Amino acid sequence: MVAGWEWDDMLFAGSAPYYRRGRLPYAPGLEDALAGVLALDGSGRLIDVGCGPGTLALGLAPWFGEVVGLDPDGGMIAEAERGAAERGLAGKARWVRARAEELPAGLGTFTVAVFAQSFHWMDRDLVAAATRAVLRPGGALVHISDLKTQTPTVAGLPHPAVPYAAIGDLVRDHLGPVRRAGRGVLPQGTPGGEAGVLAGAGFTGPRRLVVPGGQPLVRTADDVVAGVFSMSFSAPHLFGPHLGAFESDLRRLLREASASDRFSERQPSTEVFVWGRDADPPAGVEPAGGSASRSGGPGQPSDSADGM
């Protein structure tokens, strides 16, 4: 948890209806790549911790006997339930409104736990230990995020780029210069160093996998607006009675950037770190990775992306 900031239930208030439309998808083939790396065979149980509207859990559902999505936001849980019904997976998927810090929450044990751009919002030491406790020996914790080292370009694509820098300036004009998060602020952003946290909790590894992106995407102004409202630092509740004025300014900015109402973007690559849950070490033996890994290391993913 970030010093000076406490999680509260307003973090993503009002964002759920915008999430599926607004967020860029994970790189194509992510689910198949995970199935290969984890040797998934359609059995076992998956828990998606901080599942949001269930995007990843539903994509992985064919590879498990049961999937459980855990999220503290009631709107996200409702969207996940709706998505499961649309895909005929309501009988295979279970959605639980709870914080990760409440694990095990009577949910039993799992073969795989995934954190898709959500771990940075949690009490990470507590959640890492709790997750290891609900994983079966030989299970895996999977940390997923967009690959942060890429700088995609829209050169050669038919439409202008999304004016992200100008959108950020507009958000700051309306909400102030310090990043908002729920009822609090995050002057330094969200934390990194999750490799040290997971190693310190007794996980082994990790194995790293990058699923390549780069595919061209076309985004409408409505898609971009939904993306802005899906972020914690520009969630609808933050604008209060001025929400309509902000959206009008945002749409004006987008019209000025693209008269055709179309924007080009490239699909980000997806970075995956797979951590092992081995059998418990003998008493008095420090887990592999130990204190030497607590500060993280080269190649670790950044948790700076905003996500559930």
Image (cartoon, grey):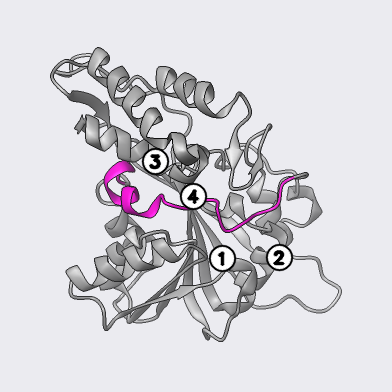
Q: Which residue is mark 3?
A: 229
Residue 16: x percent and y percent?
38, 54
Task: Identify the residue shown where x is 59% and y is 37%.
Answer: 180
Q: Nearer the viewer, residue 109 or 284?
A: 109
What range of the chain is rendered magenta?
5-25
Instruction: Tally the numbered discs.
Output: 4
Judging from the image, what secondary structure is the residue with disc 2 in?
helix
Q: Which residue is mark 4?
A: 117
Left or right: 171, with 89 as reference point: right
Answer with mark 3 or mark 1, whichever residue precedes in sequence.
3
Vertical side of 241 occupied by 119: above or below: below
Q: Which residue is mark 1?
A: 276
Vertical side of 245 occupied by 99: above or below: below
Mark 3 residue type: Phe
- Closest to the camera, between mark 1 and mark 4, is 4
Answer with mark 4 or mark 2, whichever residue precedes in sequence.
4
Distance from the alpha carbon under mark 4 to that under mark 2: 17 Å
Residue 24, picture quadrant? top left
Vertical side of 204 occupied by 228: above or below: above
Left or right: 32, with 203 as reference point: left
- Closest to the camera, between mark 4 and mark 3, is 3
Mark 4 residue type: Gln
Judging from the image, what secondary structure is the residue with disc 4 in?
loop
Distance from the alpha carbon under mark 3 to that under mark 1: 35 Å
Residue 112: give its label: none
Can residue 202 be seen here? The reply is no
Q: Which residue is mark 2?
A: 126
